[in-house]
Image: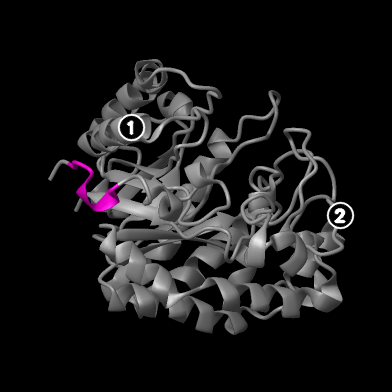
Amino acid sequence: MKVFGVNYGNRFVPEDWMFKSGPDNSDELLFRGCSPICGDPNNENRKCLACLPQNEFEDRYLSWLDQHIKDTDFEQMATMGVNVVRVPCGYWNWVTYPDGSTPDGVHPDRMRVLQTIKPERYKPYFDRVFDSAKKHGIKILLDLHALPGSQNGEMHSGLTAPHAQFNTDWNKKKAVEAVEQMAKYCRKRIDTLYGLQVINEPNGYGKKVDPHVFLDQYYKAAIKSARKHLPKDIPIIVFEWTYNFKKWKNDRFPYDKYGNVIWDTHIYHLNPGDPSVIFIQDKYWEDLCAIKSFHENQSGGVMVGEWSLAGPTWSKEKNEKFVQWIVWSFMERCHGCIFWNWDCDITEWSFQKCATNIDWKNVPKPI
């Protein structure tokens, strides 16, 4: 199956930049009165879910989910040729912590805010996602987007921190527990499941810390945990940036031992202005070559779990030309690609808004 998909982000893991105006304005609906916790590894002060006041967390967060999980979204996706929807979620949606404890890392008081609601309260919202997907003939890739302590220190992990702080045994144990809970849930939804992703964008550890060995251990444990409940043919998805593919040996997770393990990677080249399409294509070639090689050398292959049209400010004609090239280029070299995001104020980050000028369903795709 070739994947042509879209991310349903900014739901379970809200991001402060995506809805800044109109009736969905997150500054009014979700982050009202909130201040950033601290700078992230990029020295940016961003609002995140852990910023919410604890006494209003339940009301604000569940209201946000109620408002932004819509059957009509999936109906529209299906008309645009989408066959897989990646759904980011957080560890707090799946696991609890004993006796007021929290993940390891700075800002435990803020992490405790994320634990306000019991995981069973989120089940109806995941049910809505899977029910709508099934109704409209779409598969779900359930993505553990935010890991205990934060795997990158960025607001899309639910918590900002000066550096990534996932890499402790306690955090790994709870992440593996979250993966197993996700797998248990997905087992009951197997007919609508594309796969289960165990991490998103590990990054931000600094030059003195190489998380490779830790990630390798986590991936192995998470895959084995998921396989207790999911058959070998269902993809378990791990992550690596293209520039780090070389750190992994060929066929790191062979099918006979781990089942179908796919590697996710994300490709963004944010070049501002109005460069030529050829100039931007050149920026992608190194990634495309790396994807093709890694796809051929790992038994489960590769998929591009995030990409967008952000960066250049282009005409309708240039965007159409680029989309026709990049979608084919991704899908020809790996399992497929998933656009970030379904909706956003900024058109170039919104699959839905881009549809005004791009006929997504009829973009040429390899079979």
Residue that numbered label 2 is attached to:
35
Vertical position of residue 295 compared to residue 8: above or below: above
Marks 2 and 1, Cα distance to the nearest angstrom? 41 Å
Question: Where is residue 156 shown, x and y percent of the image?
Answer: 64, 51
Question: Where is residue 84 shown, x and y percent of the image?
Answer: 32, 59
What residue range appears in magenta? 359-365
Which quadrant holds the C terminus? top left
Question: Where is residue 237 shown, x and y percent of the image?
Answer: 39, 51
Q: Which of 53 and 347 is in front in this view?
A: 347
What numbered label is drawn on residue 317? 1
Q: Which of 214 and 186 is in front in this view?
A: 186
Q: What residue type is disc 2 on?
A: Ser
Q: Which residue is drawn at 34% across and 17% down?
A: 278
The answer to if 71 sits in the magenta stretch is: no
Q: Residue furthest left?
A: 367
Q: Which residue is drawn at 41% across and 76% down?
A: 71
Q: Label 1, secondary structure: give it.
A: helix
Vertical position of residue 258 compared to residue 253: above or below: below
Q: Which of marks 2 and 1 is nearer the N terminus?
A: 2
Q: Which residue is drawn at 25% across and 57% down?
A: 81
